[in-house]
Amino acid sequence: MAHVSIIGTGNMGEAISSVITKGGNTVEMFGKADADKPATGDIVVLAIPYSAVDDVIAQRGDQLRGKIVVDITNPVNFETFDSLAVPADSSATAVISAKLPGSRVLKAFNTTFAGTLAAGTVGPLTTTVLVAGDDADAKATLIDVVSRGGLKAVDAGGLKRARELEALGFLQISLASSEKVPWTGGFGVVA
């Protein structure tokens, strides 16, 4: 079984924790007050806004070396709400990976809302977590954790696919914030 550290105690952190523990894995969660507590998980989930990533890396970069680091961020430009806040040929995950060369960085959970993770369904479909990254073993480990938690997980390809996952997450956020889809809904995958 896996031991997972989740940095962030918001809705997404709580929902991801629920999925992980349903599969018999252990979770430790870190809020802002836990800055001095080391992240001991084999998998570390960054369940924080993209704007907080640099602070977490500055604070915990050494702790993340050798670990699977899961980026769930959607780097939306919240000033204009009309684009992503990363270069058009990159992704938040690529930026994080470059800053953590000793970690195995994956993109996951960013195309699902907390409600669909917690419920385990999107409409009549089982919630699907898309996973992208260049380390096949890291992806297989995370896919196993997600699957044991009762959700579907799909290998979405290499790290370069994180850009498309972030665009999909941005579209879903845009639709929900304009009340075209509910925050308890979203995209489903039929396979």
Image (tube, grey):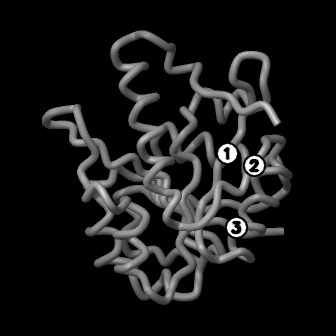
Residue 153 badge = 2
Q: CA distance from mark 1 to mark 3?
A: 11 Å
The answer to whether residue 141 is left or right of residue 39 is right
Question: Which residue is the extreme one toward the front?
Answer: 89
Three-letter code, disc 1:
Val
Mark 1 and mark 3 lie on one chain; the one further toward the N terminus is 1
The residue at 40%/68% (across/down) is 94
- Examine the rendered structure and indicate whether residue 187 appears above or below residue 7: above
Q: Residue at x 32, y 54 (%)?
A: 50
The quarter of the image holding the C terminus is top right
Q: Secondary structure at mark 1?
A: strand
Q: Is residue 3 left or right of residue 92?
A: right
Q: Which residue is mark 1?
A: 129
Q: Quote the CA–CA distance across marks 2 and 3.
A: 10 Å
- When the figure is inspected, residue 151 is found, relative to residue 30, above or below; the finding is above
| Mark 2 and mark 1: Cα distance apart in space | 5 Å
Q: Are marks 1 and 3 in contact (CB under 8 Å)?
A: no
Label located before the other in sequence (2 or 1) = 1
Question: At 36% across and 25% down in the image, what residue appears?
Answer: 174
* Contact check, label 2 and label 1, Cβ < 8 Å: yes
Question: In the depicted view, which residue is nearer to us: 73 or 149?
Answer: 73
Look at the numbered disc 3 and give the secondary structure of its residue: helix
Picture quarter with the N terminus: bottom right
Percent position of residue 133, x then y: 59, 68
Q: Residue at x 29, y 58 (%)?
A: 52
Q: Which residue is mark 3?
A: 139
